[in-house]
Amino acid sequence: MRKAWAAVIGLMLAGAASIASAAETSPALRKVIDAAQKEGEITLTYGALLGGTDGARTMERLVNAKYGTHLKIDYTPGPSAPEMAARIAQEQAAKRPSSTDLYPVSMTAANAHLFQAIDWRELVPELPEAAMKFGRRGVAYATLLVGITYNTGLIPEDKAPKTLKDLLDPQWKGKIGVRVSTTFMAFLALPSEMGPEGSVAFFRKLGAQASGMIRCGNAERIASGEFPLFFPNCGDYEARKAALAGAKVGAIIPTDAACMAYFTAGIPNNSAHPNAARLLIAFLLSREGQDFEWDADGADYHGLPGSKIAAVMAKYRAQGVNFIDEVDVEEQHPELLDVQKRMLEALQESMTK
Amino acid sequence: MRPRIDFGTAAIAVPVALASAAIVGLLLFVVWMSVAETDAGVATGRYGLQNYVALFTDPLVARAAINTFAFAALAVIVAGGFGLPLAWLAERTDLPGRSLIAPVLTLGLLVPGFFTAMGWIFLLHPRIGFVNQWLRQAFGLAAAPLPITTIPGMAWIEGLTLAPLFFFMTASGFRAMDPSLEEAARTAGASGAAILRRIALPLMMPGIVAAAIFTFTLSIGTFDVPGVVGLASRIFTFSTLLYVKTSAVDDLPNYGLPAAFGTVILVLALALSLVYLRLLRRSRQYQVVTGKAYRPRPIGLGRWAIAAWVFGGSYIALALVLPLLLVLWSAVLPYYAPPSLAALHQVSFATFARVPWPLVWRGLRNSVILAVLAPTLALGFSFAFSWLILRSRMRGRVFVDEIAFLPQAIPGIIFSLGAIVVALFVLPDAIPLYGSVAILALVYSVGWISFGTRVVNSALIQVHSELEEAAYVAGSGRLATARTILVPLISPALVSGWVWLALLAVRELTRAVILVTGDNVTLPVVTWSLWNGGQFNEASVVILTTIALFAPLLLLYFYLARGWAAPLEPRTDREDA
């Protein structure tokens, strides 16, 4: 008898939760849910982000639980972002469906109008306008604090470099791994920062100081001590993930050059399941989605309520650090991308001397 | 006495024509891409020489060129230094346990190159390599005595990984060698060294030159070792320089530069193939398999067998055991750490639970299909090419051989891009190649025609044409003669080549990664994506799984191959008695 009562109460609570959830669902979101349900699946050819295969499985479960759908996420690891962007362009030119329903958006890809412009606030009212990038063709779902990754076993926190200038100290000569590209570094060319010539000169000096080049995602080479320092990283999330797994790796935000970049997502014009993709992105921007993203990639979007990265940023800001939005800089000053190219050339030149 | 035109000739010429069209089409695509301007990956219709200007006016290119040629030349020396003696030991001597050499060499191929390179970094890096650390402490040295971060160091790793290729490209030639010449020399009082130098090696020259040219061009374009070791130590080769140059800041790839580079390599490959063709023109002198009392006899090693095993064992330890230990070590750690007592306490099998098994199984299914389909297609094409080159009197057959050599010069990325363009824009929707396993099989097989024709050429050269002429006299057609005489006689080479290509299919990454869209994902793409995403340990588990699944198949093959290759197996001492 007691069990029967418990079941009745449970059912009533579940019903109430369902009614509350339905009440929260806006007509725009309801429309997307219904259309997504008809599409039935999401094809996700993506890099290592969003937790890979495990992440896809988790997202599938969470999305279906949140929206009452029965969507299937078909995940496949994809090639590098530039190659994937080129593939999306070719598929559109050939009038074929895209091999992925959502993908990170870059400025060039957005300018080429490969992605749909969407007002994401219709689906996620709490989303700040600033989260929508590249003419609303992409939306930021995670904030990356770009800086230095270091081996915490070899370099104590108080001895680690704190600024970009510190990286040029002779004690670090031959101990720095530099990234193969200078992406996310355009902001350094702003007059308020190093300026065009100053930033190019900095990378020339950094090249002379560096021991070699590695790419992002090689945290094991920092943990092993092959490269005690790595700059510029692709965001502090990598060190956070590696440290959680037990690696002696940490991240530093340079106090003289703090920038934030983003993981963005957009829906290709030729997506085969555009509504399902919209629903997945809407989920990523929800609290549950943000918690998932923090667990999967070690990052979330700072502008959404309850953000964990916002708390990290607040700590830095309390120390006087001013974060510059790299994507905004690139959108407002496209001419700086040429300086960014010169930075890379200077880095390569000095590294081969 | 040969029939002028028959069904057999046409049947052999058709696949050659189709494959040649694909290769020439791809080459034209490379040249077009090197001069075409693109916008967001799509052609604009404008053309220019900007990629060549960028390639040749860059001061870094000259330095990279010197590094690349030094690296490739040294890698060939290392690969030949191990591969050639091992092939001779396995095929021409009575070394106890020689039948194990080939299976063990092939096992090493299942470990991706970037893992081997990482293993050598942890071993011989000037600062963190534990051998260098130990040597410095033991002898109080100021500098690392064995730094791997040099051109010779990189060439050493590359050479070790290419030695199995050298082995496979030369072993079949050794196996098919007529012993009568060696025996005649021995009767005339020649020493073992003199016989090797004056009889065996000259007879093997086409196979050796083919293997050397092949490994040289492979080394020029390779990325694994230069990418992991060179790039991290400021040593640029062509491939890493291109990688850095094409890591565009505008987030869209610049394929023009690799295409311009591919065109330059194409010219180099043509020049090298001319050297090889000069050897082929004198091919009759290498015909050692005749219809008369053919039966190769093994050379007794005596006490030298111990030295031979030390030599073979050293190679196995360096090229197979070390990388495998690294894979095993990282598979049982939650996060990669150099071997130490502290790290030993972290050993667990938790990583196995984090591996995306459904994706691994999907990749495995496709890799197995490709391992069967692609080598069969590639060797089918290659046999047809080689037959036309060496056995027909067709005009322009020299050009056919040039065409067969060229896929080697086409960068893997360009190959796949060409296939995407054809699948998306040329083929009608009724032929759904895009995103299929079939497109991978076709791209792999056409890309391997260079290798396949080198293997088949080397074997065909050694089969005297008198055997086929006898068949023609007896009324046999060309197709029937090829099927009943040539194929069985060169079956050891074909089977070795097939296994080698099957292994390449299981580890091919560059071409696959561009073409994979979902259903056609392969095992190496899964491994690479895990590594690329910082999941080094999970990638290790997938490699271990690959080895665990494919090693028994390989061993089974080698067990069965002893029977298949029986017509050309060396006679044993017991048989002689």
Image (cartoon, coloured by chain):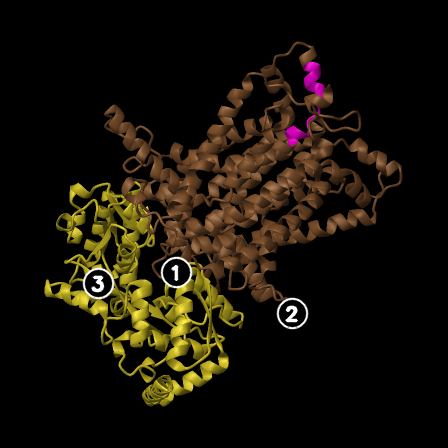
Chain colours: A yellow, B brown
- Residue B226 location in percent, x, y? 40, 42
Same chain, labels 3 and 1? yes
Q: Is residue A91 above or below residue B9?
A: below
User: Marks 2 and 1, Cα distance to the nearest angstrom?
Assistant: 33 Å
Q: Which amino acid, by three-letter code, is at mark 2? A: Ala
Residue at 58% x, 51% y: name it.
B444
Of residue A106 and residue B305, the one placed in the foreground of this image is B305
Q: Is residue B433 above or below residue B16?
A: below
Is tag 3's residue or tag 1's residue first in the polypeptide sequence?
A: 1
Same chain, labels 3 and 2? no
A302 to the left or right of B355: left
Examine the rendering and report whether any part of residue B500 can be seen: no
Boundaries of the magenta span: B173-185
Q: Secondary structure at mark 2?
A: loop
Task: State the image quarter where residue B464 is shown.
Answer: top right
Q: Which amino acid, by three-letter code, is at mark 1? A: Ala
Of residue B218 and residue B348, the one placed in the foreground of this image is B348
User: Marks 3 and 1, Cα distance to the nearest angstrom?
Assistant: 23 Å
| Chain under disc 1 | A
For the C terminus of chain B, which image quadrant? top right
Disc 3 designates what residue? A259
Disc 2 designates what residue? B430
